[in-house]
């Protein structure tokens, strides 16, 4: 099994996300994460889809995606020559006596505390999946009441780009 990150340029129109997701569901493929956003050209959106599968399944996914009329371009982002990031927001239960511990852990990871209340803090962190997982692991001594992850987004390094 291999982990793949596909960067896909699609028409920015209604129904595109449904058609792409439908391709996965019809064939029984699981999407690990999916992010979508408008590009510098308002008529186009970039989808970043992360999947795990055998080599032949990943090849089939790419071939099937190319057949969708709204898909303008698709590339697999190579792990060694791409920048991939994810954002998490973590709400941690704590009182004022333990808040400094969370602040110290956050500083180590260059995370930002974006909200403080009397009994909790919300921490924002951007980075690789392994960095985010390590951060969550260090917070295991605290009660995490909520956690939201955006999913991976990425770009190829250097001058390589989708059109």
Image: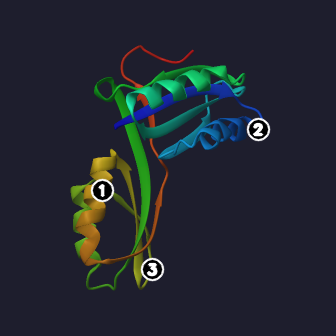
Quadrant assignment for the C terminus: top right
Q: In the current view of this chain or complex, which residue is farthest to the right?
A: 14
Asked which quadrant contains residue 26, the reply is: top right
Among numbered discs 3 and 2, the one appearing first in the sequence: 2
Q: Nearer the viewer, mark 1 or mark 3?
A: 1
**Figure label count:** 3
Q: Residues within 10 Å of mark 1 (few under 14, many from 20)?
A: few
Q: Residue at x 32, y 29 (%)?
A: 79
Mark 1 → mark 3, Cα distance in angstroms: 24 Å
The image's mark for residue 15 is 2
Q: Position of residue 34 (x, y in %)?
A: 54, 43
Q: Which residue is mark 1?
A: 133
The image's mark for residue 162 is none
Q: Position of residue 126 (x, y in %)?
A: 38, 49
Which element carries disc 1, helix, strand or loop?
Answer: helix
Q: Residue at x 76, y 33 (%)?
A: 13
Among numbered discs 1 and 3, the one appearing first in the sequence: 3
The image's mark for residue 117 is 3
Q: Position of residue 82 (x, y in %)?
A: 36, 27
Q: Position of residue 115 (x, y in %)?
A: 45, 69
Which element carries disc 2, helix, strand or loop?
Answer: loop
Q: Residues within 10 Å of mark 2 (few under 14, many from 20)?
A: few
**In this view, 18 is above or below 121:** above
Q: Residues within 10 Å of mark 3 (few under 14, many from 20)?
A: few
């Amino acid at each position: 099994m291999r982990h793949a990150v596909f960067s896909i340029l699609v028409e920015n129109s209604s129904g595109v996300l449904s058609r792409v997701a439908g391709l996965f569901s019809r064939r029984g493929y699981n999407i690990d994460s999916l992010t979508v956003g408008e590009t510098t050209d308002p008529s186009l959106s970039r989808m970043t889809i992360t999947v795990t599968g055998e080599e032949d399944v990943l090849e089939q996914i790419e071939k099937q995606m190319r057949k969708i009329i709204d898909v303008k371009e698709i590339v697999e982002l190579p792990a060694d020559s791409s920048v991939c990031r994810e954002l998490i927001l973590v709400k941690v239960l704590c009182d004022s006596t333990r808040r400094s511990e969370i602040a110290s852990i956050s500083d180590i990871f260059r995370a930002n505390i974006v909200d403080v209340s009397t009994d909790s803090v919300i921490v924002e962190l951007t980075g690789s999946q392994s960095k985010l997982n390590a951060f969550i692991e260090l917070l295991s001594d605290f009660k995490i009441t909520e956690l939201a992850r955006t999913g991976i987004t990425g770009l190829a390094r250097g001058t390589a780009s989708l059109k």
